[in-house]
Amino acid sequence: MFTPLFILAPTLELQKKTAFANTPFGHETAHPDLLIIQETPSIGIETVRDLITWSHTKPFSLQQKVVIVAEAGRMTPQAQNALLKTLEEPPEFLQIIMTGTSELGVLETVRSRCRVMRVQPKKEHWVESSGKAEETTELFVWPTTLSSAIEQAEGLAKDREEAIDWCEKTLLNERLSLERYAQNAVYLDIGLRKVKHLAHAIRLLKRNVNTKLVVEDLFFHTRSPLSVSLSAPPSVPLSVPLTALAKPETIG
């Protein structure tokens, strides 16, 4: 069962980025197992009742459903009170994520039922409500398409040492995520796959295998399973088998 998550970040963009980084959807915003609530100027009790009804129906194609309530402080007190039972006892397949710039407007009874994540725009670390802080390399959203995998690989592949450092820190973060979501089969499958390929990429990078090919292969094999299931698989692999490339790069 998922613990409801309350993300506090200074900008709407950072709130959105953090929210999706904690789901299996990547950048995908239109999916039957995803519900996004971002009403203005307020979120009323009828909207929350619709949320509750939606959340108790079984997932359509994944093993979980996700609801994101943007700017949770916009919920009326009545709406928040109506949500309490679902926060306390959500269906085992339901993940609730709320976002906001501050805790103002959010009832203590709501906050106390959530894990609070505070995100800063530069160092981008999160602090849980327990007060424990864990540093992250950056707030990273894994690629969900072949084109985005190639694009993100190009940026990371410019420097071997930076690529190794990023992979090592990301591997640590993924292992921490596995501990937090060990009871969820979807996250366990995704997380184990990422850990496996990150560890493999680190070994290859330290053996001087071509940096760009290693990173492309990493992102190709760790794309969100959502994107893989919704799009046809590529007719050719993203890169040649890396086992054949374990030799130093030539310069010049």
Image (tube, grey):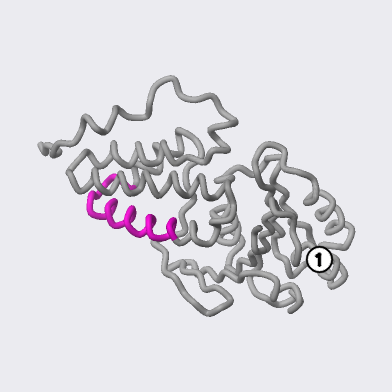
Residue 224: say if magenta: no
Question: 27 or 58, which lies in front?
Answer: 58
Crowd around label 1: few <14 · some 14–19 · many ≥20 (10 Å) = few
The quarter holding residue 102 reads bottom right
Residue located beneath label 1 in the image: 85
Q: Is residue 179 left or right of residue 162?
A: right
Q: Is residue 172 magenta?
A: yes
Number of marks in the image?
1
Position of the N terminus, as image quadrant, is bottom right
Q: Residue furthest top?
A: 235
Q: Position of residue 22 (x, y in %)?
A: 56, 55
From the top left corner, tell me how far across and down residue 133 is, in percent.
Answer: 47, 74
Q: Nearer the viewer, residue 203 or 68?
A: 203
Q: Residue at x 46, y 38 (%)?
A: 148
> Residue 39 versus residue 202: which sits nearer the camera?
202
Q: Secondary structure at mark 1?
A: helix
Q: Is residue 152 left or right of residue 245?
A: right
Residue at the (49%, 59%) spot, across then down? 177
Residue pictured at 55% horizontal, 73% vertical: 128
The picture places residue 46, in percent across and down from the top left corner, at: 89, 58
Indicate the amino acid at tag 1: Lys
- Tell me: 227 left or right of 60: left
Q: In the figure, 139 relative to 228: above or below?
A: below
Identify the image quadrant of residue 239: top left
Whether 222 is drawn above or below 238: the answer is below
Which stretch did the figure color magenta? Answer: 156-175
Which quarter of the rendered picture does the C terminus lie within? top left
Q: Quadrant of residue 106?
A: bottom right
Q: Is residue 97 depicted above or below 185 in this figure?
A: below
